[in-house]
Amino acid sequence: MDDQKYTKPYKAHVLVLPYPAQGHINPMLQFCKRLVTRDIKATFANSVFISKSMHAHPGTSITFETISDGYDDGGYEQAGSAEAYLEMFRIAGSETLADLIKKLDASGHPVDALIYDGFLPWALDVAKQFGIVGVVFFTQSCAVNSIYYHVHKGLLPLPLSGKNVSLPGLPFLENWETPSFVYIYGSYPGFYDMVVNQFSNIDGADWVLFNTFYELEQEVLDWVAKLWRVRTIGPTLPSKYLDKRLKEDTDYGINIFKPNSSACMNWLNSKPNSSVVYVSFGSMAELGEEQMEEIAWSLKDSNFNFLWAVRASEQSKLPSKFIDDPTLEKGLIVSWSPQLEVLEHEAIGCFVTHCGLNSVLEAICLGVPMVAIPQWTDQGTNAKFVEDVWCMGLRTKADEKGIVRRGELECCIKEVMEGERGREIKKNSSKWKTLAIEAVDKGGSSDKNIDEFAAALAQSHR
Ligand code: UDP
């Protein structure tokens, strides 16, 4: 019998490595909180740059460490291109990750498993080098990853030919409904390589985790489960918004941007139920000036109350006449919102979103109908599911310049807020909300998977 197993106050030690972006850090950190409640020790490795800029208060016993992406003073922005960034990250990351594992080993807390972001497949090689369990964590949907897998295998040759894509476990997709890196072949070669290379060594991973829940993507999950040891562990919202079993888990705990919380909440408190359109495009999307202008005037013309999160770096694109408009008492613009609190507020009637997966999952868990304005990467595919599979919202149509015009957006907002389809969408929204909560609550599909995973980790404890 291994004595050490019984002297440590935990059953196993995991090291967790996210891709350094808000939408990746949040779900992986949340997953750590679920592991901690199962007596797993979690060490979370941010990049040096992120650790300098984040506002962290995770409120649990997660330990923070750093590794280097090679750009300690500016992160991705400093690199100049995705290609340069990802290549440097692979080199500096492999080295500093190995150093961190050695350091943790030497401190008397050897690492039993490495849970790494699918965007960083080289991390699996490091795990193997140390003989520890390798766990890939996908922060994009199973559907999107299945498409990339087929591209990687040459089963979906690019550039796409024909008009449609038909893949196992997925609805029939028009070409433009596939991720932008697939549909607009060559648009972002660095990111394209990254998403496709996620599958370069996946057969060597001991576990494949998805931040989704079984009921949400059943068909495609059944299909990928034939390939790997797949488990769904999401949605990874703070427990407060789901099962409420983790009393301390009331927010994500790390914010790269600081939210204007009291301004948002005070303003929402003064608004009637279901009267506000909340608009946000997440942490990365950069909209063109023309698109910003169309959104601005459609919000004004549709005459609903609106709360719009426009990041500081995007605000100069707002039409000046719009900001100064004295008739604009119906709107509030903030640089970053406490999105979960906002979506939970009863004043919110719909969510105009870029359909980043976190935003979509948040809307699902909080039962908020969506109007989709996808921008790039996986967002168009997520939007397809929002409209046609989950029936939780409407997609706007862009014109030949790729711009969603004010009339189109206004129409979709009106339909969701007060139209016939809106009523159907609201019904579906509350159905999905219930299913999401059940998945993470005691005995639910994700809860059981996390139990199983934690128990297996305890077996591999050194
Ligand atoms: N978010 C937020 N405040 C904002 C806008 C976004 O807290 O004003 C959060 C949101 O709740 C979500 C994340 O930022 O968790 C965005 O992730 P998503 O996958 O939707 O988009 P990405 O930023 O990766 O494009």
Image (cartoon, rainbow, N blue to C red):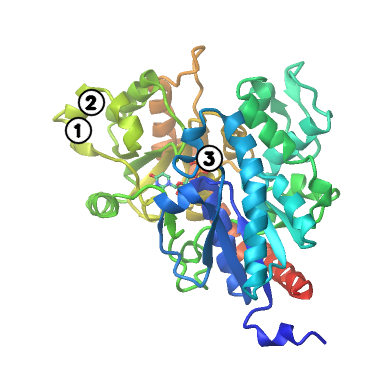
- Which residue is labeled 1 in the image? 328
Quadrant location of the C terminus in the rendered image: bottom right
Kindly state the secondary structure of the residue where label 1 is placed: helix
Q: Nearer the viewer, residue 75 or 227?
A: 75
- Which residue is labeled 3 in the image? 356
Q: Is mark 2 within 8 Å of ligand 1?
A: no
Q: Residue at x 84, y 48 (%)?
A: 203
Q: Is residue 441 visible?
A: no
Q: In the image, residue 63 lies at what x, y percent? A: 53, 67
- Which residue is labeled 2 in the image? 322
Q: Residue at x 26, y 23 (%)?
A: 319
Say whether residue 443 is left or right of residue 308.
right
User: Which amino acid does the dot numbered 1 rest on?
Assistant: Leu
User: Which amino acid does the dot numbered 3 rest on?
Assistant: Gly
Q: In the image, residue 209 lies at what x, y percent? A: 70, 55
Between disc 2 and disc 1, whose residue precedes? 2
User: Which amino acid does the dot numbered 2 rest on?
Assistant: Phe
Q: Nearer the viewer, residue 389 or 22?
A: 22
Kindly state the secondary structure of the residue where label 2 is placed: helix
Estimate the spatial distance between the alpha carbons at disc 2 and disc 1, rounded to whole Å: 8 Å
